[in-house]
């Protein structure tokens, strides 16, 4: 990726984000009539977000795509936190989204661009 040196720290954070995304997808897709999947579909950005920044062609694009991913996570997290319905794995989904958010912020700081 042009303009970005992948350090051990950045690589480790990317791996954490991958695990968070896979865990969220696993919890969301569980074949259970009381799963979150049957309630709403605000989660598309979570499932696509990893691809957004992995496919980035340069550091600037990656930084911006991580920002878009963070917005998707924030939206999904707000929905889950404010939803007054109980369903299977709700707390695990919220926890996974919080971890994903934290790891995305961490990655964005690690690749922060020089000020112009």
Image: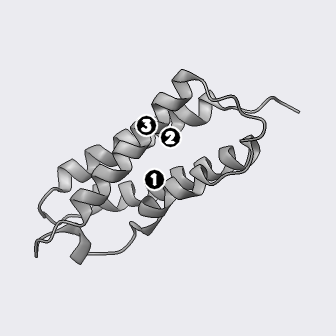
Question: Which is more toward the observer, 63 or 2?
Answer: 2
Q: CA distance from mark 2 to mark 1?
A: 11 Å
Q: Is residue 16 left or right of residue 28?
A: right
Quarter of the rendering containing residue 40: bottom left
- Coloration of the structure image: one colour
Secondary structure type for disc 3: helix
Instruction: Please report whichever mark, 2 or 1, sits nearer to the chain's N-terminal start.
Output: 1
Instruction: Please report whichever mark, 2 or 3, sits nearer to the chain's N-terminal start.
Output: 3
Residue appearing at x 10%, y 76% in the figure: 33
Q: How many marks?
A: 3
Q: CA distance from mark 3 to mark 1?
A: 20 Å
Where is residue 46? Give x, y as percent: 43, 59
Residue with the mark numbered 2: 104
From the image, which quarter does the C terminus lie in? top right
Disc ID at residue 15: 3
Residue appearing at x 43%, y 42% in the figure: 17
Vertical order, 84 against 70 (above or below): below
Residue appearing at x 67%, y 44% in the figure: 63
């Amino acid at each position: 990726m042009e303009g970005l040196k992948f350090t051990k720290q950045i690589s480790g954070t990317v791996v954490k984000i991958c695990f968070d995304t896979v865990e969220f997808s696993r919890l969301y897709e569980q074949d259970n009539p009381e799963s979150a999947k049957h309630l709403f579909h605000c989660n598309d950005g979570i499932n696509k977000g990893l691809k957004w920044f992995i496919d980035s062609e340069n550091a600037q694009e990656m930084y911006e795509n991580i920002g878009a991913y963070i917005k998707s996570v924030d939206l999904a997290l707000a929905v889950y936190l404010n939803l007054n319905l109980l369903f299977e794995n709700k707390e695990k989904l919220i926890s996974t989204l919080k971890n994903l958010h934290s790891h995305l912020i961490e990655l964005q700081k690690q690749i922060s661009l020089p000020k112009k």
